[in-house]
Amino acid sequence: MAEKRISNKELAELSYIHPTSISKLKNLDEIEQISGRVLNNLCSALTKAYYFRGDERIITPSDLFDYTFDGLDWNPSENNIQVDGKEKDIIPDDESDDSSGDATVA
């Protein structure tokens, strides 16, 4: 938004989201949850704002967020993952066993 000088007021008008909500979203370091409607409205509004400034890019959710791994207790060399303190198999035991005897992956 800053590179195209899109104000909170303009984004609020284009997205039909209250200016206070736009300000809160911009100032958060982490967003725990956002509705699909709000996300769609933001992307559509930013696409319009960029278009009005001569940039025909289409804004998608990946343009708005950076993903940060949440630190699940997981070791990729093991066949399970810890979720909410419970161990869950990634590959069920019956699928992880190679019964053909041709090859075994360690």
Image (tube, grey):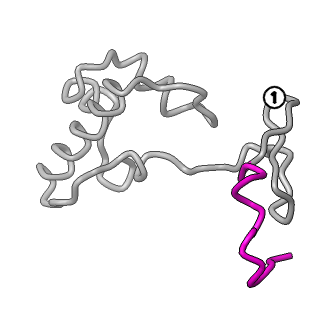
Left or right: where does residue 44 sit relative to residue 92? left
Q: Residue at x 20, y 24 (%)?
A: 13
Give the extent of the magenta segment.
Answer: 90-106
In the rendered image, residue 102 lying in the magenta stretch gets the answer yes
Q: Nearer the viewer, residue 26 or 57?
A: 57
Residue 31, image x and y in percent? 58, 30
Q: Nearer the viewer, residue 75 or 1?
A: 75
In the rendered view, would you say 29 is above or below 93?
above
Three-letter code for the amino acid on which mark 1 is drawn:
Asp
Q: Residue at x 86, y 45 (%)?
A: 73
Q: Residues within 10 Å of mark 1 (few under 14, many from 20)?
A: few
In the rendered image, residue 91 lying in the magenta stretch gets the answer yes
Residue 17, image x and y in percent? 30, 19
Left or right: where does residue 85 sit relative to residue 34? right
Secondary structure, mark 1, is loop
Q: Nearer the viewer, residue 60 or 14?
A: 60
Q: Which residue is mark 1?
A: 84
Quarter of the view holding residue 45: top left
Q: Nearer the viewer, residue 68 or 102?
A: 102
Quarter of the view holding residue 20: top left
Left or right: where does residue 31 sit relative to residue 5? right
Q: Residue at x 41, y 23 (%)?
A: 35
Residue 27, image x and y in percent? 55, 31
Q: Residue furthest bottom?
A: 102
